[in-house]
Amino acid sequence: MEKPHIAVVPSPGFTHLVPILEFSKRFVHLHPDFHVTCIIPSVGSPPTSSKAYLQTLPPSITSIFLPPISLEQLPDATILAVQIEHSVATSLPYLKEELKSLCSRTRVVALVVDVFAHKALDFATELNLLSYIYLPQAAMLLSTYFYSSELDEILSSESRDPQEPIKIPGCVPVLSRDLPLAFQFRSNIGYKQFLERGKRFHIPDGVFVNSFFELEAGAIKALQEEQIIGKPKVYPVGPIIQSGSIGQENGLECLTWLDKQEPKSVLYVSFGSGGTLSQEQFNELAFGLELSGQKFLWVVRAPSGVSSATYLGGGGAGEDPLQFLPHGFLERTKKQGLVVPFWVPQIQVLGHSSTGGFLSHCGWNSVLESVVDGVPIIAWPLFAEQSLNAAMLTDGLKVALRPKVNDGGLAEREEIANIIRDLMESEEGREIQKRMEHLMNAAANAIKEGGSSTRTLSEVAANWRGI
């Protein structure tokens, strides 16, 4: 019988391409009788990072790039989610043709799409395919999507106390300021599209979420109980993280430097492939690192007024970010830390015995990578749903500390220095480390043979084979 085939549709941006393909890699590794074709929308020419990554895929995963959309075709460049969704919508006619062609020549059993590519779900009905959304984020975010119309009513109430925590089923209560970025600007198109995505989550046959029961027991339990009232089945399949790094020359330098440091003595500082700081905040972070007296490895990008400035470009090299550092900083800290422009091999850095903490933007990929290696976190969210993740890590799981900001939204140098010392040196930091090690063991158990996430994927594979 012909191999069962899965069509996968990511959305543009390196950090949405990698998670859905890592899911595909894990699936075909466990179930090698399947083949995956990834149909990729892109904005402009695909970034080098995406092309290099695609070359590392096994032969049972093939990829097709759709004709690129130009940035000029996209609305309101300041709202990232709007850019991403619009670029997928513009690509839909090309996507439909590729899907029809694929179905005509192979035994396609399922369509799996990224959350921002949800409009492609309509083709599944037409082509008689099972359909799924792959959410490369937390179960808590999935709960927020399912609960979004109720949240809209709560936030619209004029009598509501803005300081009263909001309860999302199964999740740690959060303040409204920690809801995803769209909720902070409820009059704009980004919020309307978030609510629309929330409704679209009811369409597919199932939702894969990159989490595991022991990490988000409350949220996952609540989501699975909701299935009886007409919501799709929820499959926790994580942690799925990138297993290897794409080689670049900075990698060797920073790993050699880490080899010379004491165990668990270094704070790793990175805001992901898409995150940037304002010049003022960039300066305060530099002075805070210096004041802390702790060893650090800092991945720097040029400051920007938009926190997601490098997202769709995959964080490609632009102007030299070192020129934006405070005068004399590199000289003063040359024995204390290492500053690396643009990129380091994060998986290897987090797995290194010298790394004792991670100052992170709390993008979900980075959160999971930290959990898998048992590295405690300083939570510094920038955009998207990162504040929601930060609240879960600090208030729910208690494996992170979060710096306070002043009235202007700035984390000041003394606060940064204090929180770094707390994580790296204090009794509280040691307790956080213990809790993170417990999660690290639970993560390993979830994906081992017979583990909860492995069993979930076997259940899906058996269902797909039967089609």
Image (cartoon, rainbow, N blue to C red):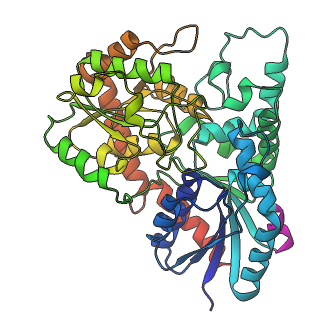
State whether residue 167 is above or below residue 135.
above
Q: Position of residue 211 (x, y in %)?
A: 52, 47
Of the pair 158 and 50, the residue shown nearer to us:
50
Relative to residue 51, is residue 74 drawn left or right?
A: right
Name the residue at 45% across, 42% down: 366
Across and down, in percent, residue 133 comes to 69, 56
Q: Nearer the viewer, residue 414 or 106?
A: 414
The quarter holding residue 102 reads bottom right
Is 123 magenta? The answer is yes
The correct choice, above or below, for 420 with respect to 255 in the image is: above
Chief secondary structure of the magenta portion: helix
Quick one: quadrant of the N terminus?
Answer: bottom right
- Furthest-bottom residue in view? 1
Against 100, is 164 above or below?
above
- Magenta part of the chain: 122-127
Residue sitting at x 51%, y 66%: 51
On screen, residue 170 versus residue 89, left or right, reads: left
- Residue 304 on image: x %, y %: 55, 31
Taking 145 as reference, is 134 left or right? left
| Whether residue 222 is visible | no
Identify the residue at image location x=70%, y=60%: 132
Query: In the depicted view, which residue is nearer to us: 322 or 133?
Result: 322
Q: Based on the picture, tell me whether residue 312 belongs to the magenta stretch.
A: no
